[in-house]
Structure formats: C-alpha cells, structure tokens
Image (tube, rainbow, N blue to C red):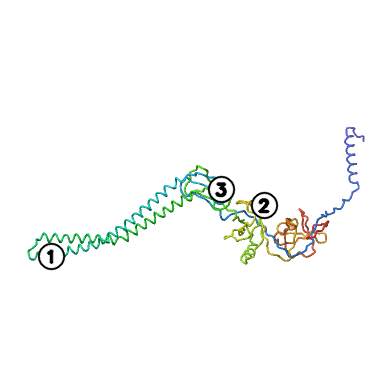
Amino acid sequence: MKLDRRYWPWVILSLGVGVFLLLVLTRPRQEAPPVRPRIWQVEALTVKPRTLSPVLTLYGKVENPALMRVTAPAASQVKSLPVHEGERVRQGQPLVRLDPRDFEPRVLQAQAGVAELEAQMRLERERHASDLASLAHERKLLELLRNQVKRLERLRHRNLSSAAALDQARMEVERQALALQQRQLAVDQHAARIAELQARLDKARAELAQARLALERSQVDAPYEGIVAQVAVAEGDMVQPHQLLLSLYPLAQMEVRAKVPAPFQKEIADSLAAGQEMAAWGESLGHRFRLRLRRLAGQAEAGGIDALLEVVSDAQALRLNMPATVHLQRPPQDGVVPLPYAALYGNDLIYRIVEGGLRAARVIPLGDWHRNGDQSWLLVRSPDLRAGDLVLVTHLPDAADGMAVTVKARREVD
C-alpha cells in the first residue's frame, strides 16, 4: 500500500520525537556530589574561674533635692530680672526684683495699725489708773452722802428738816451708788479690755511681719552658688500670688537617681545598712564623675527601687534631667568567669565548644567587668562551666546546639 505524500511530514515528525525520547531515556546518569556540612572557623576563650568584683550598670537621670522654686509673694510687676536660664550665679547675686511700690504701702499701713493699737493700750492703762484713784473718792463720797441722809432723818424726826431735803439727799446717795458701781465695773473690765487690745495688737504685728516678709521676698538674691534651672517670667510681667518666677539649684547637692533591678535590691540595702561603701562612678554625655551611694528611695515601683547617689566630684558640667549611666561596684564574687558580650546569646545563653561542636550552657549574669581600663566584659557563673572549657566568643547569627565549628584562635584572659 502506498502512503499518501500528504502524511509524510507527520511521519517524519513522529520519528524525530521517538528518537529524542529514546536518547533521553538511555543517556548516562551522573551521581550528585555529596553535601558536606559547613564548618565555621571561630575564636574561643579558655574558661578560668576567679574571684572578681562585678560592676552593676544602672541607668537614670540627674536630679537635685535642693531645687528652689521662687514664687511671687503677692500680686506685683516684675521690675528687674537680670539672670537667664542655665546661667551660673554666685551667692548673693540678684535674681529677681518685684516693684517695691506694691509692697511698701502695705508695710506702712500695718505699721500704722500697730502704732494705733499701742496708743490704745497706753490710754487704757492710764484710764485704769485714773479709775482706781477715782474709785476711792467715789466710795468716800458715797459714805459722806449716806451720813448726810442719816443726819437729815434725825432732823426730820424733830421736824427740823423738810421731807424734800431728805428725799433730795436720798437721791444723791442712789446717784452716787450708781456712779460707784459704774466705776467699779470699769475697773473690773480693765483686764478684758487689755486682753482684747493685746489680741488686736498681736494680729496687727503679725500683719506687719507678713507685709515686711512679702517686701523682703519681692527682692530675691541667690542664697548659694548654683544654676538657674528655669525662668518663667520676663521684665514687666504682671504676676499673681504664688506664681512661679524662676527656679535655682546648688551645684553642691547634685544627685543621680537610678533604677535598681529586683535581684540586686537586697544586696544594696544590706550594704547600706552595714555602712559598707560601694564604689561608684557615672557617665553622662561623655562627662565622667564620681558618685557615692547614699540611700534607696522611700517607695518601690514595678521595675524596681530607685537608688540615690550623690555626685562627689566634677558636678559643674551636669544639669537637671540629664541621662546618666551609673556603674556600681558590687562585693567580690567567687568562681566567676569573665566573657566578652559577643559570647552571650539572649539574656543567659552561651555555647561551649566540645569535640568540634557547640554545646549550649545556661549562665547567671552577675554584672560588668571593666578590663584594661574601659573595655567592658560580662561576669557570669554557671555549673556547666569548668576550668579549661572553651567558650565560643565569635558571635554567630545562626548558632545552635550541635553546630560544627573549628577553633582558629584561642584566647586567654589576662
């Protein structure tokens, strides 16, 4: 049977596909090369436990417990304000002057009130002395009038005197008795009047003292050498009573308030109670200064309790609320291992190198250790660390238990 030429191209295409499939199926197969695990070249540190003093690093801010806030004693106008915020002032230097015309009239008015009451006190004492002298005369006069009535009564019995004369004499006796009673009352009330005047005088003197104090407080000078922390008004401003004018703090009483984590609170409290001084120093914006731990705060918060440390040197460059890093020297600890921070993973994990592989170990961080001056290492303690162990100090981002490594350099701690 003869094939129609129209089908020849399809036959040729089918033969080509068949030959291609045959070649693919019969090609030689190559074995995949074996996958070799990557071995990291790392540095290791030889463990050598020793007795060292950890340094507890705290973070806080600069404060001053003697911060003085100057307020207006009364409504007035700011007459003079010769200082500026942040300016260092000497003791006795003028800080602010309020208009004295707002205070001097009150002083004069209070002085007049005191003088008036003092004059009334003198007048009352003189009146009392006069009443005492008059009282004796009043009694004598009453006695004379009563004797006169008795004589007139005898004369009346003899019809030698008129009834009108006797009645008139009796009226004089009653009138004199009333006058004597009023005089006696005035004498008896002297002590009460003196007490009332004395109370009013004391009140007037207190008002005078307040007026003088307000005048004195309207002219404020620096009580010590310090720094002007804030200026809240300007010259010409009208101020109200108790309005803040400016604030000032002394350089001699600078402090740092830093938060102490809960695990270290008892240790620090015990040291303070025993009178053991813990060496401390601080850093703030590149400035270094010495500190002395003074006390713990009176109340704690969720994050811990605040430690208050006195700045004992180089306080001139410090300002309120500056951030500060505090380094507090803890008592010596036995069996601790110094490690660079690169050896720590997370908060408490390191890796030992055992037979070419990594083995995880949990540690207890104790604090910093300043090696060779300013180089900061971490002091740790762990039951898994023995003298002579190798600890990974090259920080590997994917470090895991069992990872293969090779030690290219071994370091020793001086």
In the figure, residue 125 lies in which quadrant?
bottom left
**Disc number for residue 287:** 2
- Mark 3 surroundings: few (<14), some (14-19) or many (≥20) residues within 10 A: some
Across and down, in percent, residue 265 comes to: 63, 62
Residue projecting furthest to the right: 1
Q: In front: 231, or 99?
A: 99
In the figure, residue 278 lies in which quadrant?
bottom right
Looking at the rendered structure, the kind of residue marked 3 is Gln
Q: In front: 351, or 279?
A: 279
In the shown orientation, is residue 291 left or right of residue 240?
A: right
Q: In front: 209, or 364?
A: 209
**Disc number for residue 151:** 1
Across and down, in percent, residue 189 comes to: 30, 60
Q: CA distance from mark 2 to mark 3?
A: 23 Å
Q: In terms of secondary structure, where does tag 2 sit? A: strand
Looking at the rendered structure, the kind of residue marked 2 is His
Residue projecting furthest to the left: 159
Task: Tell me which label, 2 or 1, sits earlier in the chain.
Answer: 1
Task: Tell me which label, 3 or 1, sits earlier in the chain.
Answer: 1
Q: CA distance from mark 2 to mark 1?
A: 111 Å
* Of labels 2 and 1, the one closer to you: 1
Across and down, in percent, residue 200 comes to: 37, 55
Q: CA distance from mark 3 to mark 1?
A: 93 Å
